Image (cartoon, rainbow, N blue to C red):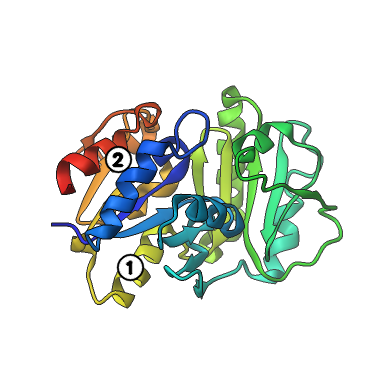
Amino acid sequence: MFRVVASDLDGTLLNSDHKLSSYTKQILQALRQKDIQFVFATGRHHIDVAQMRENMEIDAYMITSNGARVHDSTGKLIFSQSIDPTLVSQIAQTCINDPKVYTHIYRGDGWFVNKEDSFSLEFHKHTLFSYQLFNPLKFETDNIAKIFFTTTDNTLYPHLVKLKNSLEQQFGNKISVAFSTLNCLEVMAENVSKGSALKKIVDKLDLNLQDCIAFGDGMNDFEMLSMAGKGCLMQNASLELRERLPELEVIGSNADDAVTHYLSNLLL
């Protein structure tokens, strides 16, 4: 019996409309009634996820910004690791003159973007979490959970791959870099991942990673899926993730509430 369930959100637990369905709410509440801990594990901001958790009416843990922030089941911050402030400006200015790329930062309780980005807002229309504009040449560099770069078209994925290679060449192991989707490249502090954050949660619960089952669809889920006692891939998972983890079970699509149907059959 798994004691902890950890799930990514976009492309995994959320449906195609970026919402948590009523069925998902029902199953998550049933899991908590059986004293099974639930962990939202996402690249999203903690303010955004906290609204979802309140709507679910469950006391879930939250791994946000891909592991840079961890909140316990009461909403208390129990882990925080920000990008080195001396690196932040250089990273944020990498694509300052690239018309194809939007530069975002999560600083403190805020989300900041270098230019208007209606495409990204679509992902947050149900939580109403929104951004402010910022100037990459002049902004506060402390308390940055992550910097991320987006495009509005998946065909620009090779463009972001070149950016990833450039960042890794320039900053090496001072940063962690991962794709959450084909059009979103995310940069966190060194050794930050959903997997390392999940380890902190199970330690706090006096459990171990073998007690966890995890679900994901993107490369930013790689460590979490690898480290959990059982990892499950979404049918809609990225090709790279499926190739990197060929031994993992592939379940259905996020469009069909596959995670919660799977959990219902397995644990309820």
Considering only order in the chain, which callout, 2 or 1, is on the residue closer to the N terminus?
Answer: 1
What residue sits 36% from the left and 59% below the top? 195
The foreground one among 27 and 97 is 27
The foreground one among 116 and 179 is 116
What residue sits 68% from the left and 63% below the top? 109
Q: Secondary structure at mark 2?
A: helix
In the visual, does 175 lie left or right of 23? right
Q: Which of pointers 1 and 2 indicates the residue nearer the eye? A: 2
In the visual, does 93 lie left or right of 20? right
The foreground one among 66 and 15 is 15
Q: Kindly give the residue lying farthest to the top in the view shown.
A: 155
User: What mark, if any, has residue 241 been given in the picture?
Assistant: none
Q: Secondary structure at mark 1?
A: helix
Q: Position of residue 145 (x, y in %)?
A: 61, 62
Q: Which residue is mark 1?
A: 199
Above or below 193: residue 97:
above
Q: Kindly give the residue lying farthest to the left in the view shown.
A: 1
The amino acid marked with disc number 1 is: Lys
Residue 59 seen in this snapshot: yes
Q: Position of residue 244 (x, y in %)?
A: 30, 40
What residue sits 26% from the left and 42% below the top? 232
Pointers 1 and 2 in contact (CB under 8 A)? no
The amino acid marked with disc number 2 is: Thr
Residue 265 sits in quarter = top left
Q: Which residue is mark 2?
A: 260
Q: Position of residue 71 (x, y in %)?
A: 48, 68
Dot 1 alpha-carbon crowd within 10 angstroms: few under 14, some 14 to 19, many 20 or more: some
What residue sits 19% from the left and 62% below the top? 211
Q: Position of residue 174 (x, y in %)?
A: 55, 65
Q: Quadrant of the N terminus?
A: bottom left
Alpha carbons under labels 1 and 2: distance apart = 23 Å
